[in-house]
Image: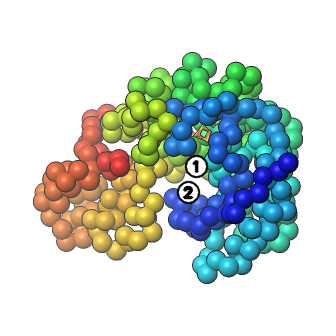
Amino acid sequence: MLATKASVVFGPVPSRRLGMSLGVNNIPLKHCTYSCVYCQLGRTKRPEIERRAFYGPDEVVDQVIRAVEEAGEKIDYITFVPDGEPTLDVNLGKMAEKIKEVVSVPVAVLTNGSLVYRDDVVSDLSVFDLVSFKIDAADVKTWRLVNRPHPGLKLGRILEAIKDFTATYSGTVITETMLVSGVNDSISKCRRVAEFLKELKIKKAYIAVPIRPPSEPWVKPPAEDRVLSCYSLMWEYLGESKVELMIGYEKSNFKLVGDPVKALLATTSVHPMRIDYAYKYLTEKGLDPDKVIPELVSSGEIAIVEYRGHRFIIRKFG
Ligand code: SF4
């Protein structure tokens, strides 16, 4: 019997990647193919890989359409971002198709990509306007450490399938890589990921760090210099315009335009900035960088880190 639920729809909420996003939670807590060490939903008791129905698709679609009609503001995306892996839902493509028949808002899905080797999952994902793939590791050992996948999954097959999907998919592909201190934040591991991402047709690669309570208490974000090294490496492989940090300051980008210091903070939470550029920017805005920058450092808002002979400002995580 399929579950029913008061609401599988939430928001709209501001999302750094997708603007104002109406969320669709099409998977009950917590059915996933992975049990990531940083998952904010806790451990997956039994990772699973068999697709099945969770909610009645018509019920979900009705709720989405109602929510779009009732939302008093512009929605940029309807996003399937559930309490688990969305492609486990055998009705995923059907629901996206029905939503698109009725509303003109683009539809997105955030997936770990672990089932993309299946033809039915490829066909479901192809319905979406945007697909975001989680790619935390491109070597088997690290993948097992960070994502703790179902034993029936094989990383080589998954990466090949993601590559094949992006080669023919007509929508937008973005990726997200979560860096965990001591697990996947070394230069060699980031390089493996960057080499893989370079082979994909993607619009943007996001680098995230765990800032919400993780399923394993030992999980920590890497130090700022590690994040900067991985960011710079991806930048070299993919180009600057394709790499962004995502370290949890969504609100900054929506509300803080106009104030030069706040704008600087918002920018450095996405792109680390060379300190000489920050000096130039603040001076042009009539501020004294020799005063502003040390104050931001001592209040814990930013860190200054060195990379290849240059000093950069990066937003502190939190
Ligand atoms: S893929 Fe997502 S839902 Fe599944 S365990 Fe990892 S973080 Fe949690």
Query: In the image, residue 227 lies at what x, y percent?
Result: 39, 38
Ligand 1's quadrant is top right
Determine the residue positioned at 46% across, 26% down. 183
The answer to whether any part of residue 92 appears in the image is no
First in sequence, mark 1 or 2: give its number.
2
Q: Is residue 198 above or below residue 110?
A: above
C-beta proximity under 8 Å, tags 1 and 2: yes
Query: In the image, residue 144 lies at what x, y percent?
Result: 59, 22
The residue at the far front in this view is: 1
Badge 1 marks a residue whose secondary structure is strand
Determine the residue positioned at 60% across, 44% down. 175
Query: In the image, residue 125 lies at what x, y percent?
Result: 78, 48
For disc 1, the neighbor class at 10 Å (few under 14, some 14 to 19, many from 20) is many
For disc 2, the neighbor class at 10 Å (few under 14, some 14 to 19, many from 20) is some
| Nearer the observer, 300 or 310 | 300
| Nearer the observer, 318 or 257 | 318
Mark seen at residue 17: 2
Q: Name the residue tied to disc 1.
A: 204
Q: CA distance from mark 1 to mark 2?
A: 9 Å
Horizontally, is 304 left or right of 142 in the view?
A: left
Label 1 beta carbon less than 8 Å to ligand 1: no
Query: In the image, residue 306 lies at what x, y percent?
Result: 27, 37
The answer to whether any part of residue 204 appears in the image is yes
Determine the residue positioned at 19% across, 54% down. 299
Badge 2 marks a residue whose secondary structure is loop
| Mark 1: amino acid | Lys
Q: How is the image coloured?
A: rainbow
Horizontally, is 36 left or right of 225 in the view?
A: right
